[in-house]
Every structure is written in structure tokens, then in C-alpha cells.
Amino acid sequence: MYESMYHTLFSAITNAMEMIEWQECQGALFCLEKACLDAEEIYMSQGPDQDVKKTKDPLDEFLDTLECPQCGYKIAEYWHSIVNNRNKA
């Protein structure tokens, strides 16, 4: 949720700055006002409690795709065993 709010506001700020450079102050103000309303809508529709989503680490997703061509052993299993051993030490 906060990520989409950030992108909405960041994009609007960038656009507004460009409009101000071209002396389009009313357009810049409208752009910022709309972004505030859009970000508020994102917040209201998703709520702060729904923001916590467990996403998979990109490295884990990549490792899940790899396996030994000879024996079919999953590389991710080997990687996780190394990480778990380090965490125990």
C-alpha cells in the first residue's frame, strides 16, 4: 500500500516540478491535489492493517528455478541449508 502511495505522489511531484518550470502553476497545483486524493483513496481502500504482505525474496524466486541438470537437486534447498547453518552458528 505505502509503495503505491509513494509512486503516486512521487510521480505527481515530478510532473508538478516540470509544470512549474514551464510556469504552468495551475496545472501543477491540480496535479498535486489529484495525487493527494489518489493516495488517500489508496490508503482508505487498503487500510494500514492490510499493508503487511509476505512477499518472496527475488533471490529465493531465482534459486527456485535452478536445479542440477544431472541429478535434479534443487539449488534453493542447498542455499537454504547453508543460510540455516550460518544462522545457527
Image (spheres, rainbow, N blue to C red):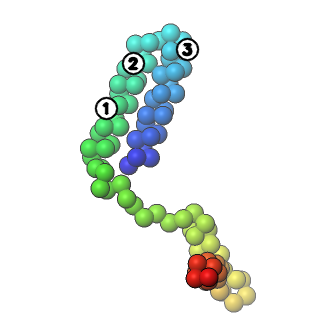
In the structure shown, which secondary structural element does the residue marked by tag 2 occupy?
helix
Q: Which residue is mark 2?
A: 29
| Residue found farthest to the bottom | 71
Compared across the picture, whether 24 is left or right of 88 comes to left
Identify the residue at image location x=55%, y=14%.
21
**First reached walking from the N terminus: tag 3 or tag 2:** 3
**First reached walking from the N terminus: tag 1 or tag 3:** 3
Task: In the rendered structure, find residue 21 and report the number of the disc placed on it.
Answer: 3
Residue type marked 1: Leu
Judging depth in this view, the residue of 84 and 53 nearest the camera is 84
In the structure shown, which secondary structural element does the residue marked by tag 1 occupy?
helix
Check disc 2: other Cα within 10 Å, few if <14, some if 14-19, many if 20+: some
Q: Which residue is mark 1?
A: 37
Residue type marked 2: Leu
In 3D space, how far apart are the residues under numbered discs 1 and 3 (Cα atoms)? Answer: 24 Å
Identify the residue at image location x=31%, y=37%.
40
